Image (spheres, grey):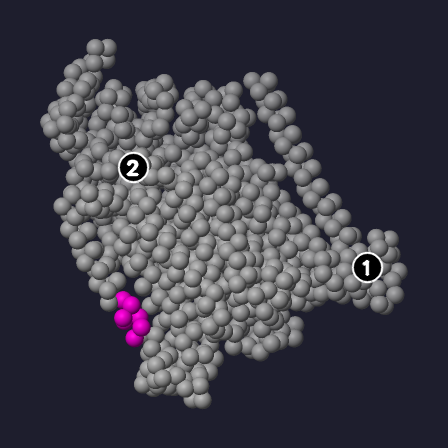
Amino acid sequence: MTGRHQANEAQKRKVALRNLAIVTSCVALLILLFIVSMNTGYIKLSPLDTLRILFGGGDDRENLILFDFRLPRIVLAILIGAGLAMSGCIIQGISQNALADPGLLGINAGAGLTVILYVLFCGANSFLSIFTLPFLALAGAGAAACIIYVLASQKGQAAAPLSLILTGVAVQAGISALTTVLAVKLDDSQFEFVAAWQAGSIWGSNWQFVLALLPWLLLLIPYVLMKARVLDILNLGDDIACSLGVAVRREQRGLLAAAVALAAACVAVSGGISFVGLVAPHLARRLAGPRHSILLPVCALAGAVLVSAADTLARASVQPTGIPTGIMVAIIGAPYFLYLLAKSK
Amino acid sequence: MSSILTKKLTVAYEENLVVDELDLALPHGKITAIIGPNGCGKSTVLKAVGRILQPRNGTVYLDGKDICSLSTQEVARKMAILPQSPQAPAGLTVGELVAYGRFPYQRGFGKLKPDDKKIITWALAMTKLTDAEFKDVATLSGGQRQRVWIAMALAQQTDLILLDEPTTYLDLAYQLDVLELLYNLNRKQGSTIVMVLHDLNLAARFADYMVAVCGGHIIRHGTPEEVMTAEVLRETFHIEAKIVPEPRTGRPTCISYDLI
Amino acid sequence: MQDCLAAKIEYGRSHRLQPVVSAKGGTPPKLNQTDKPNQAASAGKKGRGAAWLIIAAGPGLLALLMAFSITRGAASIPLSAVWDALVYFDAANTSHLIIVDLRLPRVIASALVGAAFAVAGAIMQGTTRNPMADSGLMGLNAGAGFALSICLAFFPELGYSKIIIFSFFGAALGAALVGGIASLRRGGATPMRLVLAGVAVSALLSALSQGIALCFNVARDILFWTVGGVAGSNWEQIRIMTPWILGALLGAIVISRSVSLLSLGEDVAKGLGLNTVIVNLLCFLLVLILAGASFAVVGAVGFVGLMIPHLARYLVGVDYRRIIPVSAILGAFLLVLADLGARSLNPPFETPLGALVALAGVPFFLYLARKYRRVL
């Protein structure tokens, strides 16, 4: 008996150490990316300069670049990556389909439609208007998600995973078409905004956007972490979850709502970025295993690393403007997704 | 001592009426096997009884109470259901999967209490999986994997276990392995077992009570001797069956059949 | 022999595409359920009649619709003027000029492209046995778009006849990626995996196209193809694309019997003596040509290949010898109507053609997803 108990404890220690190693590496990677990111772009700040400025030794111009442009931008990239990655992880758990992503399922498109309409007709200049963006995005994304859920469900049963995916793809196509129809009526500058949004350029890069996004993440992420075990069980299948006493439909709806809200809030400030919610959970799963209590945090970190890296690369690629981050994420993410599809059952 | 009773149970998928006004009383403390041809509604009956499907009409009574009036957690403490071909995500160990069986009894963050751990150890011992506790579920054979799911159902500590075709897709040896495990559970723990079985002879060999379903209706229910008859099989499966008592167990066995 | 083939197809079809309640793999079909041979034969007869009706009356009605379409637009032109312009063309008459230089090419382009997309979709649905196959969903449009962005960025002076070749290669790339990825695993290319692979490949190739367009400052040029429409059609384009499209349509009709056999399943077709490798290859080439040439003219218009084959199947049955020609005609109808709508809804602005077709296409796709949920 003691022998098994010891083996048990040894196993648990091994797992805990491994998880710690993963988290530490991710954080280290983020810090490295931060330094590299400072050194990229039209004006380069070397690592030593960065440290100097951070501790108050910079002149006005350097302070402006670091604290008002670069720092909020990378913080945003980290937050957006974390939020979108968690959103994808939840949707994958609910739909038991490892190939789900809020960008591919019309949720981002729905958020985009409302954000675009709002910015075009009201502009996004004041803090108040920026603050309301995530709410509007949530309205659009929520509407899209409701349509998907309703259309994919059958009377008396929870929505079948396959249905959710297919319906999502259809809704995505529909909303894109609608957005195109609206976009053609715009003048040049408005159209450029829409195009940039759809490509996923992190258009809002100052502290106001960070403050607008942060409350959403601070509220939703703890809720999701609390539901980690429920997600574990939903991932075993609706029937088994029902057998184990999970109120499947209610939990599905709650978790889906959280996923939609996370994606919507992120997309409101970043534009349409796909594939993070797809690729990050997969990476995380390979590193940390399928249990959501550790999977969700690692997933958030993986997403943060992915989007920060993509953002840095995007800014480094074409001077002086760089290409939209969403494009770079797609270029990194889509081949990995195709590789996963090729290997999956 | 849980008992299941259905009254006028009607289940439909969209427009297709699959189960039509079924009245069923499942004996507690016994092994019941539900048999019938493909598409006759036997899995549907099991799912409706297990509250996984909402019936169009009629009621399912668990211990005399309408199952809809009980919370899903309460039901989970009395009844465990194992669906067909369950899928475990990759990277899950046997111990972790069996631990999920304690979910209906857990609160908050779900830390396993010493009682929980004892039950899990017991479940693993019952299904002879003690040595496999830290192995990845995906690396096990089909038979072993099925035993893991049964261990999870055992960890749920219910009087009633429902299984939907637990032996389909398993090799012959593993089929017997699983059925003997369930038989022992019933005889030693007194668990009520209800299972949908594809193989008539295995059903007759292990069940105390059988229900033959066809087209959403019960053709016959009773002991294996009452159900495994040429007339019942003719009506249920449209075959002309030859039934003889099996030499070792004395249970009725279909040794051969012809088309009508 | 004909009835035998039709009966086989009816039987095979009815047991695969009908939503089945107990969806268990490998269950033999129920003997007491559906098609007896004479039922299949009578369904075949009804389909044949409808097919002949559509093939005979179709072109005539199409011509009338096209003529009507020519009369509508920013400047309304009477029908008589259309006849005059065609028969007694007068270069000095502005109405005649509008008709012949602007409207006629676009109407002809819509008809050709509609037929091409529809037939491409029909062939894809038949050979992949995926009821949701379509040039947009399977990555062909995105692939062609990617090739075009490369073309515009690096070879801006290329003539139309070379652009169309680029478009073929692009469509081939898209289709190969989607088909290849989806079928790499045991179980092959299920419709679900095809749809997912299609979405991912399309997203990747679109992102790459946009990236290239932004880097090389050709975003404005690419816009025309991203949005989709026949507005800029001219006789030059028509001259180049017509032989390709008509040739491929003819090829599709010739190969339609083999497609019927393939639609029963790869193994069944092999058992019946079909050389599936060659037929699959030929079908692939035909689809490329049809989708590629169409994209080069009209840009990203999806869902035509999704909807029309289903409509055709509903009207004339499951035999591809009838579905393919009927799809061509119905597809032409759809796009001419859609173009008419694009011009008339918000004059003098053009509503994007792709978006307009999507208006009908998306609900239809949702309906399909619902209908086939248990089978997929």
**Image point 28% across, 40% down: which residue?**
C22
Q: Amino acid at mark 1?
A: Lys
Give the residue type that dot 2 points to: Leu
Q: Quadrant of residue A59?
A: bottom right
Is residue B95 shown to the viewer in this render? no
Q: Would residue C48 be found to the left or right of residue C151 on screen? A: left
Q: Is residue C261 above or below residue C304?
A: above
Q: Nearer the viewer, mark 2 or mark 1?
A: 2
Q: Position of residue A275 (x, y in %)?
A: 57, 52
Which stretch is magenta?
C58-64
Label the magenta part by its dominant secondary structure.
helix
* Residue occupying the point 23% across, 51% down: B15
Judge from the rendering whether residue A159 lies leftward or rightward of residue A187; answer left or right.
left
The residue indicated by pointer 2 is C272
- In front here: A228 or C181? C181
* Contact, mark 2 vs mark 1 (Cβ under 8 Å): no
- From the viewer's perspective, is C131 left or right of A71? left
Query: Separation of disc 2 and disc 1 at Cα?
Result: 68 Å
Q: Of residues B200 and C282, which is closer to you in this image?
A: C282
- Residue displayed at 59% across by 25% down: A8
Relative image position of residue C72 (x, y in whole percent): 37, 81
- Badge 1 is on which residue? A44
**Camera sees residue C68:** yes
Specify whether A52 is left or right of A97: right
